[in-house]
């Protein structure tokens, strides 16, 4: 079992999903993959269960900055991903003015080297007068 999925945090997350009604409409038809998650923690954690490992999942195009830990057990986790590419681990994304919360990226940001990356329009987000 992967460390991030052991213990009570997983049970708490499952209970939150159950409260949300994730196996009922409209969630069931909109997110069928999520609705397929068993609603019983013992089924999820049973030996041989596929629910706690991201086998076949894609981990690509992620940018990590000032992470205390990028991914715990990275070498173990990578074996489950069908794709693990184009990630920037702990590289300064070159914010315009991080100290003053201007998180627009400078034109020479390494984020723009990530295939398919689209800049977040922080200047268009939030309350407007």
Image (cartoon, rainbow, N blue to C red):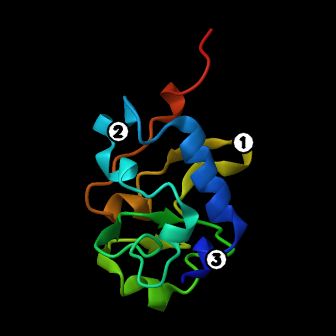
Secondary structure of the residue carrying tag 2 is: helix
Q: Quadrant of residue 78?
A: bottom left
Q: Quadrant of residue 114?
A: bottom left
Above or below, 65 against 55 in this view is: above
Q: Residue at x 29, y 36 (%)?
A: 29
Q: CA distance from mark 2 to mark 1?
A: 42 Å
Q: Residue at x 48, y 51 (%)?
A: 106
Q: Residue furthest bottom?
A: 75
Secondary structure of the residue carrying tag 1 is: helix
Above or below, 107 against 51 in this view is: above
The earlier-in-sequence mark between 3 and 2 is 2
Q: Which residue is mark 3?
A: 69
If the image is split into quadrants, where does the N terminus sit? Answer: bottom right
Q: Which residue is mark 1?
A: 100
Badge 2 density bin: few <14, some 14–19, many ≥20, Cα 10 Å: some
Q: Position of residue 104 (x, y in %)?
A: 52, 43
Q: Residue at x 45, y 35 (%)?
A: 121
Cβ–Cβ below 8 Å for labels 2 and 1?
Answer: no
Nearer the observer, disc 2 or disc 1? 2
Residues 110 and 85: in front is 85
Above or below, 14 against 74 in this view is: above
Q: CA distance from mark 1 to mark 3?
A: 25 Å
Visible in this render: residue 109? yes
Please tell me the numbered disc located at residue 28: 2
Badge 1 density bin: few <14, some 14–19, many ≥20, Cα 10 Å: few
The earlier-in-sequence mark between 2 and 1 is 2
Q: Is residue 125 left or right of residue 7?
A: left
Badge 3 density bin: few <14, some 14–19, many ≥20, Cα 10 Å: few
Q: Residue furthest top?
A: 129
Residues 69 and 123: in front is 69
Q: CA distance from mark 3 to mark 2?
A: 34 Å
């Amino acid at each position: 079992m992967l460390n991030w999925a052991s213990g009570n945090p997983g049970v708490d997350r499952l209970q939150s999903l159950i409260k949300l009604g994730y196996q009922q409409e409209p969630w069931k038809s909109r997110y069928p993959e999520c609705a397929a998650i068993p609603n019983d923690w013992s089924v999820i954690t049973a030996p041989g269960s596929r629910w706690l490992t991201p086998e076949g999942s894609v981990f690509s195009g992620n940018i990590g900055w000032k992470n205390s830990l990028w991914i715990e057990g990275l070498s173990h986790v990578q074996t489950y991903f069908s794709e693990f590419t184009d990630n920037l681990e702990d590289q300064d994304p070159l914010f315009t003015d991080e100290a003053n919360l201007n998180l627009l990226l400078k034109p020479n940001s390494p984020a723009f080297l990530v295939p398919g990356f689209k800049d977040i329009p922080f200047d268009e987000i939030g309350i407007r007068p």
